Amino acid sequence: MRRVIALAVLILASVPLMYAVAQLPPIGSVQNPTYTHVVPRYLAEGHEEAGAENIVTAVILNYRGFDTDGEVTVIFTALMSVFAVLLMPRLADKKREEGLPAVPVSPVTYFVVRTLAPFIVMFAIANIAYGHAAPGGGFQGGTIIGALLIATSLVMGSERVGRLLPESIRPWLQPAAVLMFSIVGIAGMFLLGEYLSYPVHGPYVFLRTPFLTLIEIGIALGGAAIVASIFWTMEGSEG
Amino acid sequence: MIRVFDVLLYSLLIACALAVIRTKDLLAAAIIFSTYSLIMCLVWQLRGAPDVAMTEAAVGAGVTTVLFLVTVSRTTRRER
């Protein structure tokens, strides 16, 4: 009986969805709203207006800056939620686990991770530094560094890798993206009158690239710290 | 030729998605899901979205897989 009801609900729900799909404009047509609404302006003037050659970066940091500001807040909130669920009971009894991996690591894995690590860091830094001109950026570079911190934690133990991010600076790195957005946003407010506005022309135009770079670096540091912290917290929590 | 590759990738995606749902072994499910992300990463790249492909590789195939594995190791390996 339940199967019949489930099937009926599925069919009923799929009818309007299929109807909506049938109404969609043809794929790839140049008349589509996706190609006629804001995209022509982004493509024609994005380089001049937003100050980034990579159009994705221009959209993420400038045209859709408020969205990104909200997104980094969401990511930071995710970390806070992990802390709230996993860290609070642990702080109560102050029990700390040994940082060494429970299963001995194969020497091959150890060697490969240790050998590749500097190259991965280089790749991530290049990603962050050239994010305005090439694919990649703060989000990508940051998560790559975060993933590398996790990989090295797996082979070397969280204690040793965790020392790279000392407890004293960790609380400043984790909200780095949110803080940097606030700093740049409020700076824009003082200089130009609106939160998170970038100078396009006028006396402050030289500040545009530093603003974009600061936000990229903030997103990268925050992303790396958050990804690694979520892993360390989950790993350290009692089963 | 690129069409053949497309069809191959999408078939693998669907196969991975079905396998993740069907398998009862959560460790296997996490690893299949990481394969799914890796294929998805190739699809993004083929569709001309290298920014998203990079994020998918780092977050989808890398970080979330590790977080799933940590969760499995902290809880239980069999689905109930």
Image (tube, coloured by chain):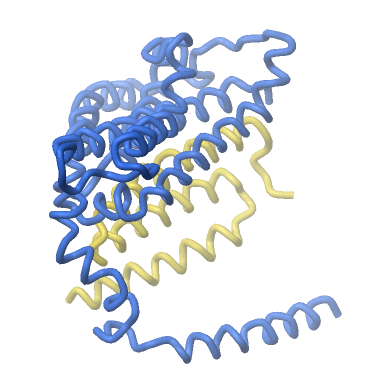
Chain colours: A blue, B yellow
Q: Residue A37: horizontal and vertical position, in percent?
A: 31, 75
> From the viewer's perspective, is A169 left or right of A214?
right
Tell me which residue sits at (34%, 41%) in the image: A139
- In terms of depth relative to the viewer, which is nearer, A77 or A189? A189
Q: Determine whether, in the image, residue B13 is placed left or right of residue A48.
A: right
Please tell me which residue lies in front, A213 or A221: A213
Q: Is residue B30 left or right of residue B63?
A: right
Q: Is residue A194 left or right of residue A128?
A: right
Residue found 68% across the figure and 13% down from its top: A91
Where A100 falls versus B54 (above or below)? above
Farthest right residue in view: A1
Across and down, in percent, residue A88 comes to 69, 21
Q: Position of residue B22 (x, y in %)?
A: 60, 61
Tell me if residue A72 comes above or below residue B21 in the rendering. above
Instruction: Say which residue appears at 40% left-offset and 53% top-offset.
Output: B37
Q: Residue at x 32, y 71 (%)?
A: B8
- Quadrant of the image containing the N terminus of chain A: bottom right
In front here: A136 or B23?
A: A136
User: Which quadrant of the structure image shows residue A106?
Assistant: top left
Q: In the rendered image of this protein, does residue A53 appear above or below residue A170? A: below
Where the C terminus of chain A falls, by quadrant?
top right
Give x and y (percent) for residue A193.
35, 42
Is residue B56 shown above or below B66?
below
- Pick whichever, A62 or A81, lies toward us: A62
Mark yes or no: residue A147 visible: no
Q: Which picture quadrant has residue A218?
A: top left
